[in-house]
Image (cartoon, rainbow, N blue to C red):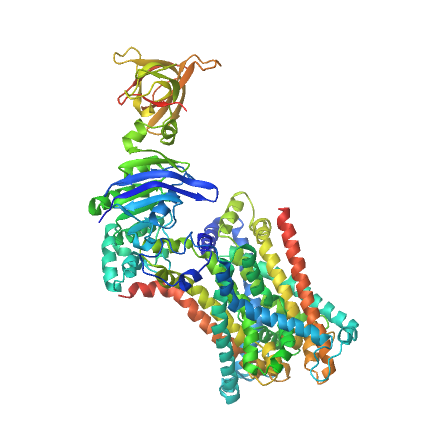
Amino acid sequence: MSSGLELRAVSRSFGSTEVLHDVSLTVPPSRCVALLGASGSGKSSLLRIVAGLDMPSGGQILADGDDLAAVPVEERGMALVFQRALLFPHLNVVDNVAFAARMAGRRRSVARQQAMEFLDLVQLADYARRPVSTLSGGQEQRVALARALARQPRILLLDEPFASLDVQLRQDMYALIDHIRAQLAPTVVVVTHDRQEASILADSIAVLDAGRILQHGTVHQVHYEPATQQVNHLLGGLNAVPGVVRDGRHHSVLGTIAVQGQAEDGPAVLTVRQEALRLVPTGEPGGPTIKGSVAGLTSLGARTLVRVLVGADDQADPPRSATLTVDAPGRPQLLPGQVIEVGLQDPGAWAVPQR
Amino acid sequence: MTAVVTRARVARRRVVMPGARRGAAVHAGVGALLVVWILAPLLPSALWSVAHTWQAPAVLPGSYSGAAFTVLLQPGTLGAALTSLLLGGCVALVATPLGLLGALAARALPGRRGRAVDLILLAPLAIPPFALVMGVNITLLRLHVPAFAGVALILVVTALPYTSFMFRSALTAYEGRFDDVARTLGAAPPQVLRYVRSPLLAAATTRAFFLAFLVGWGDYITTLLAGGGRLSTLPTLLGAAASSPGSEQLTAVLSLGVIVPPLVVLAALALPTVTGPLSRGVRP
Amino acid sequence: MTWSRQHPAGDAGHRVDPAPGPRARPAGTGAARKPRLPGRGVLLAAPAVVPVVLVVGVSLAAALGQSLGLMPFVGEPSLSLRGWSGAAAELATSAGASASIAIASTAVALVIGFVLAAHVLTAPRLGRVVAALSAATIPVPHLIGAGSMGLLLSDSGFLDRVLGLPDGFPALVGSPWWVAVIIEYAWKESAFVALVVLGSMSRSMPGMCDSAATLGATAWQRIVHVVLPLSGPALAVSGLIVFVYTIGSYETAWLLGPISPEPLSVRAVRLFGSVDLAARPEAMATALVSVAVGGAAILGGVAVLRARRDLR
């Protein structure tokens, strides 16, 4: 029952403001794609257009190859879960879930019976007869999810559905989505501003910024092989060292570092993720290391971000120093100014053209 | 009400704080005074209605009986009650849908036009009811509009500010995304109207209907002036009783006759929201 | 408000649209792409707006015409200012009486209404009882309020019997100071004021009171420095409504007020019902003065509210 979704050069303007620009995206059947972007990046607009709640100014939306332009919202066979659960206050829990079946003309008893299966799926069968006003935030969101699933959508759209839940509830919801994907295998498009959420839920991530898709790739690709410096930044990459690429090597204050083979020659920024770096005890034999001094420590709890200053710290232009951030386990016993060595793990460094 | 409840819990928790006991006493004192303020004017009416004998210096009636209520069963009173009921019903039946249309229009019309509709619908509030009737009366007479219809027309105009305001605030609170959710769940526009918008506006409709009914049911001055004495309603009977000396008991009984039925309706309307979840819960 | 933005034609769109076959209909019917059609909105507004405009317009025009002798009940129309100038002094006295009653009633209603609201907001269980009782008096018509107030406050009324003052009971009903009238208005309208204030209180009010308490504010300080300023706009608006309503109210002043001086409403109704048809123009002039006083209060009140809002 799940369909492939394709967006072809979709754009949307409100007056003179263009919120979506030439967005193209393919979601294969039963896959989950996350649209990742900050607020105002146009990700929710895109979802509304896919759902049919808004029309694109240009471009096409296709489901299984059919253009959806002439198909009204209610006939698109999609379901949309919003950040707010938006349960109908005049219906109880089970009748909310049975709504789609009722709209499809099913008898109340049949619709409710079917709804119960989906309430079971989200483990709220005991709450069927409760008024929705008695539910907690997490329960509301689970009912909203059950209501959307009960529509048996060929494409399930999630618009920041867990943003208002606390961390623990969110973990439960991720497990629930996993369960649902294993059971029903719907095609899912989830909009989120949380890269961790996108990574947990999705097979691939489309990074959206200012109405454009900057990169669409696997979770690994967008993290370790960003298309642009902006993607690296949006995905939380903390290292961006300017330099030049020649023959597959990046030259900078860090020295000469091998990067991906297909990197083009010219000015380029070295983006090496903090997770791909490690602190090497001085004198330990092994691969090449970069020497620097500790500039600062930030605790992340179980891990610590260590900022390492490499090169001469003066006011020269172009700067002759760079700061590398290393995500180290535990709490390394380091003092500011202490000289340490930084080693590079696989996957190695990555260079993106400098803008 | 949620706010009040939360607040109540907080206040109870605070009782242990120093000085809180005195504060609570002040609170209770003010509360008691307020209860007296609200109930005191209604108390004599309640006592008079069930008094059998009540001589001047006595604080309480000497003896009690329900005989006074038989007044309500006399044909003249029953007729007046029926006219009041019809008047309230007609006003509510007309003013409620018109209020909804007005509120929808005010919301749909862009900018200044929408505000103009809002202002026009609120305008009757700014005009003293007696002035409204006195001005329009001669026109109604010249057009040979029947007394009942004339009174009902003026009262519909008087009630429109209330009904349109009820719908206006309900529509403002209405979450447009409920429409979106319903559409994505497969509801066609007519189904959205029937299964989502109508039930969500049901509470506002009830409130608007009730208010409009009260305008007709409890009206005195419009009935008196536009009815030209041809229309006898419970309030006109009450007005006559209250303005003539020595008719305390009649005044009291008619007062209760006017205010108790709406209060019963109000309680009946309020009850489902209190017990609703329970009764819904046990239904198979 | 997404709905109104996206459905410029409002609800009508869905109902008025003849629905063609489902597939032929463009996607997102009614949403975003529907052109703005104010014509449809005007049609929607007409059933409610036309009766109001008609009745109010005809009423004001006819009142003016009658006050100037242009629409006599019998006889030939002839322009005359006698309705206005004939008893100008009396008219002014009535206007003064009406305004005084309205000002005093509004002031008392605002004070008691605010105390009611503050009590409901700050008291535990009793507050809910007070709120429910207070709300229950809202549907009581003024006529009944006045009748009952008469039973309570009149000479040898209930209060007289309860107190049993040795020097006799003060004349509250029919007193030249309008005591019973003002008490009745204050009684009815304080419940209204409390309702408006409570309704306008944001849900954050308890939170703000709590944070004020943690900052060291006593219960009294919380009411004066948090609840009172936050209810300012609601008090202003409800005060304006109470004032205008009181100017236009008849029953209470008629039943509980003294024979003279008459407020505008009592004078207008008396002259309107007079067997002397010549009193009609005077009745209409009186009615129009009450409209003018109410209108002036609204314009002034709205101007003050606007200015205050702009200052902030």
- Is residue A238 in view from this perspective? yes
Residue positioned 57% across, 74% down in the render: B154
User: Which residue is most to the front?
Assistant: C24
In the displayed structure, B105 sits above or below C265; it is above
Looking at the rendering, in which quadrant would you find the C terminus of chain B? bottom left
Residue positioned 31% across, 50% down in the render: A79
Residue A326 sits in which quadrant? top left
Residue positioned 47% across, 69% down in the render: B97
Residues C31 and A288: in front is C31
* Number of numbered discs on residues: 0
Residues A207 and A282: in front is A207
User: Which residue is most to the bottom?
Assistant: B75
Residue B59 sits in which quadrant? bottom right
In the displayed structure, B200 sits above or below C58; it is above
Residues B14 and C174: in front is C174
Query: Is residue A182 left or right of C200 when viewed as pictured?
Result: left
Residues B124 and C234: in front is B124
User: Which residue is most to the top?
Assistant: A283
Query: Is residue A233 left or right of C105 when viewed as pictured?
Result: left
| Residue C197 x/y as whole percent | 55, 58
| Residue B271 x/y as whole percent | 41, 67
| Residue C65 x/y as whole percent | 70, 74
Query: Is residue B132 left or right of C97 when viewed as pictured?
Result: left
- Is residue C171 in view from this perspective? no
| Residue A253 x/y as whole percent | 39, 14
